[in-house]
Amino acid sequence: MNRIVSTLVVALACLLPVTALAGEINLFVAASMREVVNELSADFAVKNSGVTFKKNYGASGALAKQIENGAPADIFISANVEWMDYMKKKKLADDRSVATFAYNSLVFAGRPGVKAASLHDVTKLEKIAIGSPKSVPAGEYATEAFRKAGIDKQLEKKLVMAKDVRECLLYADRGEVDGAFVYKTDALQVAKSAKILFTVPQQYYPRVTYPMALTVTGGKKAEAAGFYRFLQSAEAKAVLAKHGFLVK
């Protein structure tokens, strides 16, 4: 019955005129999507004067756990497929609404003067920041790359763990580490002093994928379903591309 209601709400939201939407939408979004989602939610709010947003940005795993523990969330955007699968397994995500929002790539960013042009060069450095692999997808991607490149043992005592990818980049910006493994979009848009030193070859880690979904409760809200539909629009794809994300 809930599945039928959810499907009807999403379908009706697609037919409603934009001005008919009103209410609060709770977004739980991977930290690396902050600028994009801020812009998209602002654009949507302009067209829907009665809609307001509450946004929670952080590590995908931490966000999923918060939702599991009862935090009000209408839309979840993860930085990897695993945490979306976790939401589905816990029956917290509306299965039929799961879709790919965007793609990204992993890079190594460091302060000026750091000599590192490849994964193997990183083993010669002293401190490297990554997001905690237990909850931060960027950290998972990085550790997978270390393993496949055969340098994981050499880096064990050099790693500095961060709570999310933005904190990871902050360490590099401040010069507290030699460099950090972050997403390309973060390094291009947010970094103040750190520069991209190299892009991690794709063969070393799974493609960085951002799945999105309505939560079970969000699927019952017309305004949440309306914003979810907006996130799939050509306008949203243009904003993603402007911020450096890939949509294909």
Image (cartoon, helix red, strand yellow):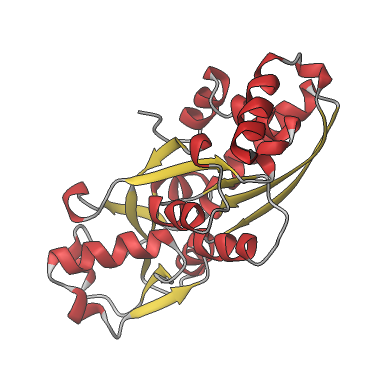
Q: Quadrant of the N terminus?
A: top right
Front position in the image: 212 or 234: 212
In the image, taking residue 105 as reference, residue 236 lies left or right, namely right
Front position in the image: 237 or 155: 237
Image position, residue 161 (x, y; %):
44, 76
Which residue appears at 64% of the width and 40% of the height? 2
Front position in the image: 58 or 114: 58
In the displayed image of the protein, which residue is found farthest to the bottom?
A: 157
Which residue appears at 46% of the width and 58% of the height? 86
- Say if residue 115 shows up in the picture: no
Image position, residue 213 (x, y; %):
54, 41
In the displayed image of the protein, which residue is found farthest to the right?
A: 50
- Say if residue 21 shows up in the picture: yes
Res 48 → quadrant: top right
Placement of 135 over or under 200, stated as above or below: below
Which residue appears at 26% of the width and 75% of the height? 125
Image position, residue 126 (x, y; %):
30, 80
In the displayed image of the protein, which residue is found farthest to the left?
A: 150
Placement of 197 over or under 161, stated as above or below: above
In the image, taking residue 121 as reference, residue 193 lies left or right, namely right
Which residue appears at 77% of the width and 21% of the height? 47
In the image, taking residue 232 as reference, residue 5 lies left or right, namely right
Res 248 → quadrant: top left
Placement of 29 over or under 23, stated as above or below: below
